[in-house]
Structures are given as C-alpha cells and as structure tokens.
C-alpha cells in the first residue's frame, strides 16, 4: 500500500486557506446542534409512547449501536481526513461514487427548503406569544359579532388558530390557494436570519452556535422542573415509559427505531462530512462520533421526560374538566346542591344512580371520562408542537411566558440544525469551484439562501402544508438510506477496509477494534439493506395519501385521502430522483474510462480506479497513543 510522509490529502493546494474551527467545543456544539433537531422533541417521545414505552428503547439502542454510531464514525472520519465536502470526498475515493456526493448535496437542498418552513411557522407562533391572552386561547367572533365562529366552536380554539389563522388550509392539495403574506414575511425573516448566521461559514456559525446549541437545553430543563411540579406529571411519565414487550413483535417498531436513529443523527445529509472537514487532520474522530451520538440519544430521552410531564398535566386537566361537566349534568338533573359532588366522589355517586335510576341516568348521555383516553391523545410533528403542547401551555399559569420559551427553544433548535443542512449545500459548491475564487463567499451563500427562499414560497400557499408533508415523507427517507448504504460500501469495499483503518490509526493513534470492523463490513450494510427493503414494502402496503381536509365533517380530525395521480408522480420523483444520481454519475464515467483506456493502448486506467486519497502514512509517521 502506498504511503505518504505528510498528513495532507494529495492534490489539495488550497489546504492552508481552508477555514478551521476556533476550538474543539465549537465543532462539537455544531455537530450536536445539527444532529439534535426538532425530531428529538416531537418525534422520539411519540414513538416511545406509541411503541411500547420503555420497550421501544430496546430496538432503539440496538439500532444506535450497530447502525447509527458506525455510520456516524465513517462520515466524521472521511470528512476530517480529506477536508472536503460530500461531493469532493466521494469523487476522491472513486469517480464512480461521485453520485453519492451529488445525491447528499441534493437531499440537503430539498430538506433545507421545508425545514426552514417549519421554522417559519415557529416564528409566527413566537411573535404571537408576546400578548395576553394568547390568540389561540379563545375562538374569534363571527362576522356579526354576535357569537363565536361556528367552525372553531366545533373543534377547538387551538386547532382553529393552526389550520385557519396560520395555514388557512385548503380542502386538499388540488387547490393551491393564495400565498399567505404573513407566512411569506416570516419565511423571508427566517432565511435572512439564517444568512446572517452562515454568511462567513464556520467563522460566523461558530460564534452563534454557543447560543443556538445550548439554549434549548436550558429551556428543556426549565420545562422539566416546571413539568414535574404539575399535577398529572407522574401519570404522564408512567404512561410514557411503562414497557409493553408485546409491541416488539411488530416489524413496524423495529423499522421506526432504525429510521429514527438514522434521521436523528442526520446521517447521509453531507452536513457532518462538511463540518468535520474543518477539523485538524489529527483529531480523535472516533471519540467525537461516540460522544455526539450518545448526547443526541440522551437528549431525546431528556426531552421525552419534559414533554410528557407537561402532556400528563394536560391530560389530568382535561380529565378533570370532563368530570366537572358530568357533575354539572348530574347536579342539574337530580337537583343536588351545588358543589355537593366532588371529583373524588363522582364515581361512587354515578354507581349509586346507575343502580337506583338507570333510565334517567342514561338519558343524560354523560361523557366517558377516563384518564387513559386523554393520555392516548398524543401526537407527533406539527400536531404536537402547534396543537397539543400549545393547548397544554394554555392551562399553565403565566401561559404567554411559557409559550415564548417553548417557541424560542424550537426556533434555536431548528436554526442550529439548518446550519448543518446549509453547510451540506454550500461546502460542496465551494469545493467544486462553482464561482471564481475572487467572488466572496458571502455572495455564494446569499445566492443559495435567496434561491431556497424563492423555491420555498410554495410552502406559504394555502396548500403549503400538504406540500411540506410530501417533501418530508418522500424527499429524504428513501434517498438517505440509499446514500448511507453506498457510503459504507464505498469506504469498506471500494476504498478498502485496511486503508481506512490505517487512516483512522494515523488520525487517532488507535487502530479500529473488532466492533468497528464487524459493524462496517457486515452488520451496518445488512441492516441498511433490511431497512431499505422494509421501507419499500411498507410504502407499497400503505397507499400514497394526505391527511388533513378542512371540509371534512369531523375536521380537525384527520381524514385519509389518496393523492391525485400528478401528485403521486411528484412523490415518485422526490423518492428516486436524487438516488438516481448514483448510477447516473457512475454510467457517465464509463465513456471517460473507455477513452482513457484507448489512449493508453489497453493499459489499466489508474486515474479512474479507486484512489488512495487519504494517503495513509508509513509506520514511522503514525503518532503514538501518548502523542495523541
């Protein structure tokens, strides 16, 4: 195997010009901020609650150990050693793998479009939180000013504010509707804030990340302390973590655990490769990978406790109100003295009346009040953030202050994730030399942000929520699984396991042990292949559909409707088009390979064979453990 005397990747004449992190903490916080996103707050608690509580942690931790951490280590290692973005890394390893880098670049671009739109909604709610009472606390008056809007009374003030006053959603995706100017302004503000933060790359984000990465932990801690002191918090946590081992028999639970680890760590986005490329070559990337992955998973658990302590309070509060309504009905019907029936006595009174006057009692049509039913009314995604949790905040003393804290946390959480997403777009563009060197980086960054803003205006239409669900469901999932599979195959089987281990030994002073070798070579590829097949089967089994329909009789309850044919075609394009770049680029290399082979008179093409870009040093160049 060829060896090189120095640590720098060959052919990189601009190595001294590449920016560097000011310190190790900046890098770690940037990776943590990118990995820890909105999904840790509103996706993991829902999965844990709906898939057997504490039992869900078993497949989750297995996926973390054999899928998440090994793949994460690969991305940090190749980015750090080659000091290039996703496109440059995979072209350097092999020109035939250039499509993996282009695919990651495309996926990051598409994800940035809709992810920042979610921040647009968060910003809108944050701005509306600076008033008392909160605008979603009561229904608005009708046009005649004689009562409340009927639709709002039929659902709830929180749902009405989300679907009508924020999204103003259309009946279905066929009707685009008009642009919502308030959302358009918020979208422009979000992209402007992001541009100001990433204007100089890591030189600017490295300063902002201290706040955006740490502030969410402060707010989570505040919510946790407050939540644990609220009535019903204990019931919420018991409900969340009570293990139901029967759920482990469902393949869906294992699939959700594997995909949650995958997307929670932001694998195959290209962002971690870009962030690691600004590290010094001799940095302990193995320790970084394990540390960041564990912090990410512990954050999910920490957020679950904070979220469900508050949701337990909401369930207990709703349960109490349900009892109060039934008690009022009993008091009026049976002429009991006011406040003569307490909540604790309600069950005994109901049993007595059911035994003595069953027909009269049945005529009241009392509500079914069970705490378990209210705990079951959990949600994930926007439903948790903008409906369930906002309604829970209404019941807390000082609701506006809690709303400001909650949406500030979501905004900074999403903003730090956007740093990694946009870095996965801009770094490859810089490495490819899209603009001449004399053009300032600020121009390229501004152009990318402006382009993203213009494309993302479609999400501010009245049908924008439908399109965001389409992008969220189809633009990332399948493509990222495919890219991750080719990443591990490219490093282990194209570049070579031994060469890769040599490079890690040179960077860290330690050679990867049996755990890393087995997971990279066998377990991770097989696990990714299994996830891919299971995901395809699941998507075929469940028809393409959309959920919200504002004309549905029981709106805002969800009604499943099939997407029209033209939307299904777009779903198919989003699902496969970025992934098709992988075989497309490989096939484009074949004519180049043939021409070079003809010019060399049939000699092996050394330029298009898998390269040795990481240039592993000889034994005497490798640092000892003490030096590291």
Image (spheres, rainbow, N blue to C red):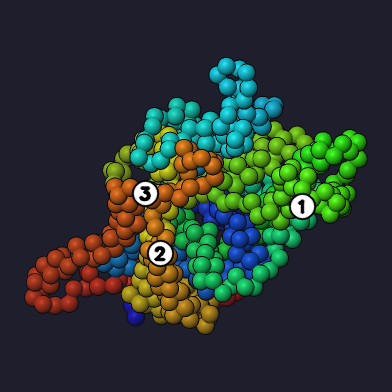
Q: Mark 3 near mark 1, Cβ–Cβ under 8 Å?
A: no
Query: Looking at the image, which is closer to me, 520 or 615?
Result: 520
Kindly report the distance in space between the C-alpha atoms of the residues bearing marks 3 and 1: 40 Å
From the top left corner, tell me how far across and down residue 489 is, in percent: 37, 73
Residue that carries the numbered disc 1 in the rendered image: 233
What is the crowding at mark 3: few (fewer than 14 residues within 10 Å), some, or many (at least 20)?
some
Whole-percent x and y of residue 578? 32, 56
At x 54%, y 56%, the residue is 35
What residue sits right under mark 3 in the picture? 563
Question: For residue 541, which numbered disc appears in the image?
Answer: 2
Label 1 element class: helix
Seen in the image, is 1 located left or right of residue 47?
left
Front position among marks 1 and 2: 2
- Left or right of 119 on screen, residue 376: right
Q: Quadrant of the C terminus?
A: bottom right
Q: Which residue lies furthest to the top in this view?
A: 144
Q: Is residue 587 left or right of residue 18?
A: left
Q: What element carries label 3?
A: loop
Q: Distance between the residues labelled 2 and 3?
A: 15 Å
């Amino acid at each position: 195997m060829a060896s090189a005397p120095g640590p720098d990747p060959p052919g990189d004449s601009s190595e001294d010009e590449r920016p560097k992190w000011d310190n190790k903490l900046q890098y770690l916080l940037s990776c943590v901020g990118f990995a820890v996103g909105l999904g840790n707050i509103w996706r993991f608690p829902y999965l844990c609650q709906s898939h057997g509580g504490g039992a869900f942690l078993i497949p989750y931790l297995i996926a973390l150990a054999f899928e998440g951490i090994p793949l994460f280590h690969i991305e940090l290692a190749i980015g750090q050693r080659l000091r290039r973005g996703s496109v440059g890394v995979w072209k350097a390893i092999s020109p035939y793998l250039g499509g993996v880098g282009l695919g990651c670049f495309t996926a990051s671009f598409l994800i940035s479009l809709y992810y920042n739109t979610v921040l647009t909604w968060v910003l809108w709610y944050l701005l509306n939180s600076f008033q008392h009472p909160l605008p979603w606390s009561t229904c608005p008056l009708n046009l005649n000013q004689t009562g409340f809007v009927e639709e709002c009374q039929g659902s709830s003030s929180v749902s009405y504010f989300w679907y009508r006053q924020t999204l103003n959603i259309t009946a279905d995706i066929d009707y685009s509707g008009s642009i919502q100017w308030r959302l358009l302004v918020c979208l422009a503000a979000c992209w402007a804030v992001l541009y100001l933060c990433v204007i100089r790359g890591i030189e600017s984000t490295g300063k902002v990340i201290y706040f955006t990465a740490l502030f969410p932990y402060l707010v989570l801690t505040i919510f946790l302390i407050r939540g644990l002191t609220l009535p019903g918090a204990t019931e919420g946590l018991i409900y969340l973590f009570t293990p139901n081992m029967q759920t482990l028999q469902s393949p869906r639970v294992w699939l959700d655990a594997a995909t949650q680890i995958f997307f929670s760590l932001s694998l195959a986005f290209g962002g971690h490769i870009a962030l690691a490329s600004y590290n010094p070559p001799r940095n302990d990337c193995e320790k970084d990978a394990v540390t960041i992955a564990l912090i990410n998973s512990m954050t999910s658990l920490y957020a679950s406790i904070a979220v469900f302590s508050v949701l337990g309070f909401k369930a207990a509060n709703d349960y109490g109100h349900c009892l109060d309504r039934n008690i009022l009905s009993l008091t009026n019907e049976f002429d009991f003295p006011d406040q003569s029936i307490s909540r604790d006595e309600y069950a005994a009174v109901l049993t007595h009346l059911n035994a003595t006057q069953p027909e009269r009692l049945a005529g009241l049509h009392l509500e079914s009040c069970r705490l378990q039913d209210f705990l079951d009314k959990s949600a994930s995604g926007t439903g948790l953030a903008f409906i369930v949790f906002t309604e829970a905040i209404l019941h807390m003393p000082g609701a506006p202050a809690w709303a400001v804290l909650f949406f500030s946390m979501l905004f900074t959480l999403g903003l730090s994730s956007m740093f990694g997403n946009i870095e996965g777009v801009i770094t490859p563009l810089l490495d490819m030399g899209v603009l001449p060197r004399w053009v300032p980086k600020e121009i390229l960054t501004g152009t990318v942000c402006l382009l993203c803003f213009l494309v993302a205006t479609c999400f501010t239409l009245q049908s924008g929520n439908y399109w965001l669900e389409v992008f969220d469901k189809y633009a990332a999932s399948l493509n990222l699984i495919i890219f991750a599979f080719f990443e591990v195959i490219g490093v282990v089987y194209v570049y070579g396991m031994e060469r890769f281990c040599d490079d890690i030994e040179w960077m860290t002073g330690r050679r990867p042990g049996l755990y890393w070798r087995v997971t990279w070579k066998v377990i991770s590829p097989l696990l990714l292949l299994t996830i891919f097949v299971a995901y395809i089967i699941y998507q075929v089994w469940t028809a393409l559909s959309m959920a919200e329909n504002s004309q549905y009789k029981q709106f805002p309850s969800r009604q499943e409707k099939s997407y029209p044919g033209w939307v299904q075609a777009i779903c198919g394009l989003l699902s496969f088009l970025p992934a098709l770049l992988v075989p497309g680029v490989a096939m484009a290399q074949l004519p180049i390979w043939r021409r070079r082979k003809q010019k060399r008179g049939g000699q092996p093409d050394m330029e298009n064979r898998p390269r040795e870009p990481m240039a592993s040093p000889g034994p005497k160049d490798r640092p000892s453990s003490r030096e590291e």
